[in-house]
Structures are given as structure tokens and as C-alpha cells.
Image (cartoon, grey):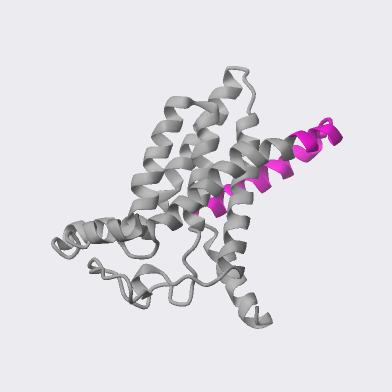
Amino acid sequence: MDHGFFNFFGEITRQSWALDTLIVQMFRTNTAKIVPLLACIVWLLFERRRQGKSIEFFILLLIGSFLAMTVSRIMQNFSAYRPRPLHNSNIEYQLPFGIEISALEGWSSFPSDTSALAFAIASGIFLASKRLGVVAFLWTIIIVAFPRAYAGLHYPSDLTGGALIGLLCTTGVAPLILHAITQKVKGINDKWMPLLWTLVFLYLFQMGTMFDDIRRYGSFLKEIIGV
């Protein structure tokens, strides 16, 4: 699958500066990748509350996305190093315009934490609205995942692995965690709600920026402790 992808798209890259630049900018611009998905979440949240429906999907999405990012980052940082396609001499692929060979040098390729987060979010949206969820999945595949493979930053298998992590965390693990929490916590005092929603806003903001600041500090800490 990986070699087939690069063999096919290797005939397309560097044929059009405009096309290459457009696709490269898709993965570089967080507002183009994640923010539209967050907008869907906010719309669903208020629409379901207006209709008097449960917003459990939102809680599952928050838990699932956090788990997906955590699991994918742990796997990337502590599993066997896998060079990215643009650093792999065994992959004959003509990089598109706008990509430097030094991009993300030293970062392991598997799995894609971006894919894991985006698919975790899309899964949560699907739980609330099947139609909007399908759109969210298509957006994630076309706008979030594909450009990263086209740019040589990930193998399709990296993105598939990240997608499976995201799906499993939101639809499989998150419900179990939520059930365990609700068994012990019967309700939240209203006085804590302003703080709770403030933390939710900050978390959504970090998702919108792909946790860039946190990941930079994490990489810095990793270098300090020599892990």
C-alpha cells in the first residue's frame, strides 16, 4: 500500500507548483485541518442542548481525543524508530514543491498523531450526527490525512494506524471510562461549571493548534532527560 501510493503520486508531484503548494499548505495550516471539525462540535453541542438531547457525544469526544493523542505520541516516542518517507532512501518519491528534506527530521513516522486526533474527533461527531459525521470523516481523509502522505511526511500505513487509534479511543475506550466515572461521580456542583467550561475551551483551543506548544515542550523535555 505504501509503495503503491508513492509510485502513483510520484508521477504527479512537481508537475504543478500551484497544486503542490495548495496541498502542502493544507497540512501546515491548522485552521484548515482541525478548526472546521471543532466548529461542527460547537454547532452540535448547542443544537442538541436546544433540542433537549444528551451531549454525551461531546464527553466521549473529549476523552477519546485526549487518549488518541496520548497513545499515538507514546507510540511515536518510545517504539522502534521508523524514518519518514522523505528520509527513507528506500522510497523513491519526488517530493512536491515546498517540502524540504529536513522537515521533521529525527521524528519517528508511526503512527500519525495528527490522524489519530482528527479521526477521534470525527468519530465523536459521527456519534451525534451520522450525516455530519460522514462529512467529518471525508474532511479528515482528504484535508487532514492525504496531504501528509502527499508531502512525504507519513506513509499511508501511518495514517491508517492513527485512524484506528482515534476510532478505537472514542468509540471503544472512552465509553468504558465515562461509565466508570459516572458510577462514582453522580453530578457536578454548579459552582464548578464555569471552571469546567473554561478548561474545555482551553482544551479545544489546543486541539485547534494541534497541541503544537505542548508537543514542543514535550520534545524539549525528552531531550533534557535523554529518553
Identify the residue at image location x=58%, y=73%.
219
Q: Which residues are magenta?
A: 179-208
Residue 222 falls inside the magenta stretch: no
Relative placement, left or right, of 70 versus 42 is right
Q: Quadrant of residue 206?
A: bottom right
Identify the residue at the far right of this view. Answer: 184
| Label tally | 0
Place of residue 26 in the rendered image (x, y in percent of width and height, measured from the top left) = 33, 55
Q: Is residue 87 above or below residue 59?
A: below
Relative placement, left or right, of 57 versus 36 is right
Identify the residue at image location x=17%, y=65%.
14
Identify the residue at image location x=37%, y=75%.
87
Give the dominant element type of the magenta stretch: helix, strand or loop: helix
Relative placement, left or right, of 215 versus 2 is right
Identify the residue at the far top of this view. Answer: 51
Q: Is residue 13 above or below residue 67?
A: below
The C terminus appears in which quarter of the rendering? bottom right
Place of residue 32 in the rendered image (x, y in percent of width and height, measured from the top left) = 37, 50
Identify the residue at image location x=65%, y=82%.
226
Identify the residue at the far left of this view. Answer: 15
Q: Nearer the viewer, residue 187 or 103?
A: 103
Q: Is residue 132 above or below residue 222?
A: above
The N terminus appears in which quarter of the rendering? bottom left
Place of residue 53 in the rendered image (x, y in percent of width and height, measured from the top left) = 62, 20
Place of residue 218 in the rendered image (x, y in percent of width and height, measured from the top left) = 61, 70
